[in-house]
Image (cartoon, rainbow, N blue to C red):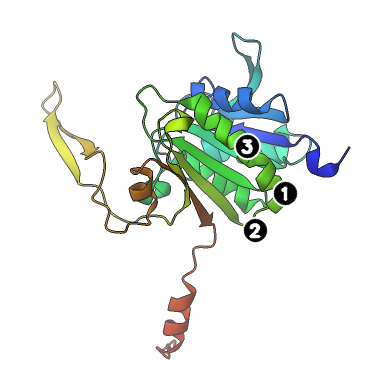
Amino acid sequence: MDVSQAPLTILLTNDDGIHAPGLWALHRALKSEHHAIVVAPERERSAVGHGITLHKPLRAYKVTLNAGEEGWAVTGTPADCVKLSMVELLEQRPDLVISGINPGANVGVNLNYSGTVAAAKEAALYGVPALAVSVQSSEDPHFDDAAGFVARLVPMVRDKGLPSGVFLNINIPNLPMEAVAGVKITRQGCDLYDEYFEKRRDPRNRVYYWQGYESQPTYTQDNADGAVLAQKFITITPVRCDMTDYSMMEQLHAWELKKE
């Protein structure tokens, strides 16, 4: 068999839990061509960022869903799922890791909070190519259309490869694929949401706060992921794990810093 056509071993994970429909839409789209293995949190772990479990044991157990499909449920975070898969659960490292499909966009500053994105980043830290995939809305999400696009992208990732320490953050309009405007390569936006905290009191008269935010910021850059997604384009943003600002390094050298 041509190696370029050989099935890949693909680790599927998410932050919405092992029963999330977006995860299994990916599995359906990939299982006929590839060896797709599911290792996901046992419950929803949205917005946990890149947290890992250090101070209590992790447990992983096999689950079988109604359709007879099997996967590993893990008591930790999305990043835990990837770590545990790489070191313990899988016989060898996968060829590719895909995290998602998340119901709701992961664009702009949300990349810093997203468990979906963190799982892909964790894989990239291990040197494994990875994709984080989200659809624009959680209202009647078009998971199968999004999964079909990802399935078509997988052979390109295999053939072209990704640099070590780089993963792709993909956001797909919540539309039938024929209504999608196209595909654009974008940068991560940095516009902040209009956040607020609603102050309330519990039945014991103790104050607590409920965080909220407006559904979409005002984008200041036309080529940012969120702005392009709003125009009904699929956005693909390459993200680096190395967070060093190299231009600032040069500026800091000019400061002539001394220890005393």
> Is any atom of residue 93 visible in this view?
yes
Residue kind at label 1, given as amino acid type: Asp
Question: In the image, residue 78 lies at what x, y percent?
Answer: 53, 36
Question: In the image, residue 30 lies at what x, y percent?
Answer: 66, 28
Image disc number at residue 163? 2
Residue 208 vertical placement versus 195 (above, below): above
Residue kind at label 3, given as amino acid type: Arg
Residue furthest to the top in view is 66
Q: What whole-number distance in Å separates the C-alpha atoms at marks 1 and 2?
A: 13 Å
Question: In the image, residue 187 lies at what x, y percent?
Answer: 43, 57
Image disc number at residue 159? 1
**Residue at horizontal 84%, vertical 43%?**
3
Residue 18 located left or right of residue 89 = left
Residue kind at label 2, given as amino acid type: Pro
Quadrant of res 260: bottom left
Q: Residues within 10 Å of mark 1 (few under 14, many from 20)?
A: few
Residue 77 vertical placement versus 253 (above, below): above
